[in-house]
Amino acid sequence: MSVRTLSRRCAVLTAVVVAAALALPVGPAAARETDTSAKSFLSGIYQSYVGNSTQAAKGVALDSPEAVKRYFSHGLASVILEDGDAVARPGAGLVLGSDPFVGRDAWDIADLKIDVKEAGPAKAVGTVSFSNFGKPETVTVELMKVGTAWRVSEIKWGPLTLRGLYKTKWQAARPQAALDPATMK
């Protein structure tokens, strides 16, 4: 092999290595984008709640079906979206009148702590502790893995649960639906 051939191969190999290095994400932002842990998922949610809801801490916007599906499991996203659709009907109101991640419509969150325990290969439970308007609060978030991404499958604020609120609505609506002539066939 001649020196000229070896020199060309070396130049091509160097170009390939440089191109590959440039294609890799760099810095902490890239690390967050590629981190698929349950704790990273929950931290991404709750970091947007640190501070006051009337100022910079706006929380997570659940203003579209895509946004709801980005954070919640299929089953829970379906009932949340169905509840939003029901609001368009006369006399209907949202089951959840507050933010699902903090259980309140206003917040001033400080001292955020997130602890996540794996509960199987595709399940985890996060305990989110914080101070809200100076009072300690804890939210428990059940997570499930959908493909390679984590989604919320349940949220508990003390004795209340997100699914429990919707279950209460369904049970309350059942007798009324049976009496409604429009629903009878």
Image: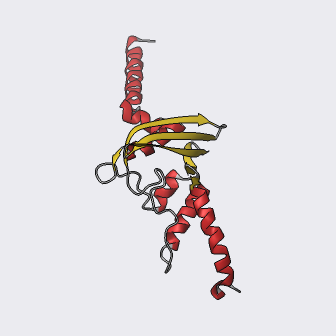
Closest to the observer, 169 or 137: 137
Residue 66 higher or lower than 11, as above or below: below
Closest to the observer, 163 or 36: 163
Closest to the observer, 25 or 133: 133
Q: How many marks?
A: 0
Looking at the image, which residue is at 59% across and 45% down? 142
Can the viewer see residue 165 in this picture?
yes
Residue 11 higher or lower than 99, as above or below: above
Is 174 left or right of 112, judged from the image as shown? right
* Residue sitting at the far right: 185
* Percent position of residue 17, x then y: 41, 24
Looking at the image, which residue is at 50% across and 51% down? 71
Is 70 left or right of 48, judged from the image as shown? right
Quarter occupied by residue 145: top right
Q: How is the image coloured?
A: secondary structure
Is 80 left or right of 183, judged from the image as shown? left
Quarter occupied by residue 51: top left
* Percent position of residue 8, x then y: 38, 20
Looking at the image, which residue is at 65% across and 88% down? 181
* Residue sitting at the far left: 55
* Percent position of residue 107, x then y: 38, 51
* Percent position of residue 127, x then y: 53, 40
Image quadrant in which the C terminus is located: bottom right
Can the viewer see residue 36 in this picture?
no
Looking at the image, which residue is at 55% across and 49% down? 158
Is 37 left or right of 5, judged from the image as shown? right
Residue 126 higher or lower than 18, as above or below: below
